[in-house]
Image (cartoon, grey):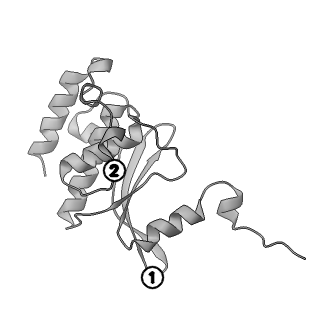
Amino acid sequence: MTSKKKFKRHRQGQTNYKKRYLLLLSQIPRFCIRITNTKIIAQLIEYKDYKDKTICSFSSDMLSKYKWIGAHKNIPCAYLTGFVCAKLCLEKNIKKAVVDIGLKKAQKGGRLFGCVKGAIDAGLDLNAKKEMFPKEDILNGKFIKKEKLFLSVFENMKASK
């Protein structure tokens, strides 16, 4: 009796194929959020013809274009990253998506859900529970004394297209 060899990405711990399959069954684009050591990446990915196609993408290190001078991995930065990525998606006439957090655990009030909250506030229809979102004062940056910076960057985003 021989055992079936698992896929390489499963063996390396990079992909949960059961979770991916369930997300692909919905046939709705995925709003993927990935947190690296230096930044937060938000992407809208569509699955067509047995391939993933990235429709739009935004990274937190691109916030310097909007005069963000803070860190690139905190919750306010995640919120702004999700907000801008959702605006880019809405420009391409995509109004609904499914949240894909990858192999990360869903942590209440964390950066992942800060990014999701930003995308929802921008107008993207996502499947997420409201109790998972960070508190409003944390999203605005009060806890890191960057509230004025956050509000000025947020106004720059609303004003630009």
Above or below — where is 40 with respect to 109?
below
SS type, badge 1: loop
**Is residue 61 shown to the viewer in this render?**
no
Q: Amino acid at mark 2?
A: Ala
Camera-side mark, 1 or 2: 2
What amino acid is labelled 1 in the image?
Asp
Image-based side of 65 in relation to 37, left or right: left
Q: Position of residue 89 (x, y in %)?
A: 25, 60
84 to 3, vertically: above or below? above
Residue furthest to the bottom: 49
Q: Residue at left 25%, top 25%?
A: 137
The residue where tag 2 is placed is 128
Above or below residue 57? Residue 21 is: below
10 Å crowding of disc 2: few (<14), some (14-19), many (20+) = some
- From the image, tell me which residue sits under label 1: 49
SS under mark 2: loop
